Amino acid sequence: MTDQNGAVDAAPSADKPTAAPAPDPGGAGDDCPKRQQPYRTLAVVAVSAWLAAVPVLSVLGHRHLAVIWLGLEVAVLAVIRLQRPDGTWIAARGRAFDVIFGAALAVGLFVLSYYANLPRVH
């Protein structure tokens, strides 16, 4: 077998027991280092709060502002995806696809936000 640096390890002998992988004590079960998990949790909470503000603004009668708020969130997440390495929690496809799709979606929301305040048709 080879390790990450390409060095070849000797094959384990039959009389020598192999070490089992250490259990993950209280970890999230992913490859996120323990020191980064509070930031990951904080980011999810921040995005959730930002998303929760959209229907609240809409219910309070600020529909145009709610759509702009949602467009801003999508744009911010596209910029974050551009700057963050692959494998972050906001990754859906490839980095280029995520950024281009997010930017196009944000622009579409900004353009269509004008129609949020149109009167109802009876």
Image (cartoon, rainbow, N blue to C red):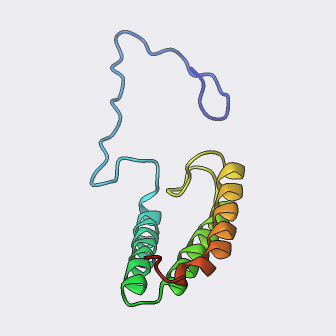
**Where's the C terminus, which quadrant?**
bottom left
The reply to whether residue 65 is in sight is yes
Residue, x 42% and y 86% (percent of image)? 57
Residue 30 position, x and y percent, is 41, 47
Q: Residue furthest top?
A: 14
Q: Nearer the viewer, residue 44 or 8?
A: 44
In the rendered picture of this protein, how many numbered marks are placed on residues?
Answer: 0
For the N terminus, give its image quadrant: top right
- Which residue sits at x=59%, y=74%? 71
Q: Position of residue 79 (x, y in %)?
A: 67, 68
Q: 106 left or right of 48?
A: right
Point 45% across, 65% down: residue? 40
Q: Determine the residue located farthest toward the front in the rendered image.
A: 122
Does 32 sit above or below residue 46?
above
Using the image as rendered, state which of residue 41 and residue 32 is in the foreground: 41
Front in this rendered view, residue 53 or 15: 53
Q: Quadrant of residue 23?
A: top left
Q: Is residue 34 left or right of residue 22?
A: right
> Horizontal placement of 80 versus 59: left or right?
right
At horizontal 59% and vertical 30% (from top left) the residue drawn is 3
The answer to whether residue 83 shows anywhere in this view is: no
